[in-house]
Image: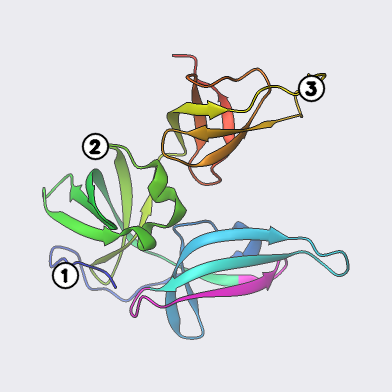
Amino acid sequence: MLETAANPALPNNPQHTMKIGANQIRPGNVIEHEGKQFGVLKIQLITPGKGGAFIQVDMRDIKTGVKTNQRWRTADTVEKLSTDQKTANYLFADGDMLTFMEQESYEQFNLTRETVGDQADFLQDNMEVTIDYVEGNPVAVHLPQTVVMQLVEADPVVKGQTAASSYKPAKLENGRRIMVPPHIEAGIKVVVNTETGEYVERFKG
């Protein structure tokens, strides 16, 4: 359930949709399916041994808060909802409740961690984010594409493991597990993709 009231400053216009390929769905998108509106929480490309690949989408009904998952073939199309967007800053977390503030109005509002999805792990104090609104209610959060985080743990290099493709397990300061190149050690700051949770490069700052 969204923990916020409708924002009267936003127009209550009918929402428009556009067709996109199922393989273009991204976390944070709002899609219309079977007459309902869903916020996309997580996507996964499944490639079975037989048959074509398909996209598994974990999503949440933005009106009821009920979570579900749906599978589409990669060639299928879905209806992506157009949304009103505003810029906000992430302030703090209180349990599973995340507090943001709109930059223009300075109005504070709350969203559940479940609404934000796995990307909530990468929120940082005062981070600038984009908020999607449907009918005046905030329904999705878009983080910057990458974030800098410190590794608190990194497995030792396996003897003979020198190939760049031979990644090893490590742990970020937010508790998320990640695979990093053999030469990356604990204590090093790395750039992480907030959408996939994957290592991008060693932070050069």
Q: Which residue is mark 1?
A: 5
The residue lying at 47 percent from left, 27 percent from top is 152
**Residue 153 in view, yes or no:** yes
Q: Position of residue 151 (x, y in %)?
A: 49, 27
Q: Which residue is nearer to you in this view: 65 or 28?
A: 65
The residue range painted magenta reads 62-77
Q: Which residue is mark 3?
A: 161
Circle 3 Cα neighbour tier, 10 Å, few/some/many (<14 / 14–19 / ≥20): some
Q: How many marks?
A: 3
The residue lying at 87 percent from left, 64 percent from top is 49
Q: Which residue is mark 2?
A: 126
**Residue 18 in view, yes or no:** no
For the N terminus, the image quarter is bottom left
Q: Which residue is nearer to you in this view: 154 or 31?
A: 154
Please indicate whether residue 49 sits to the left or right of residue 27 in the image: right
Please indicate whether residue 135 sits to the left or right of residue 102 in the image: right
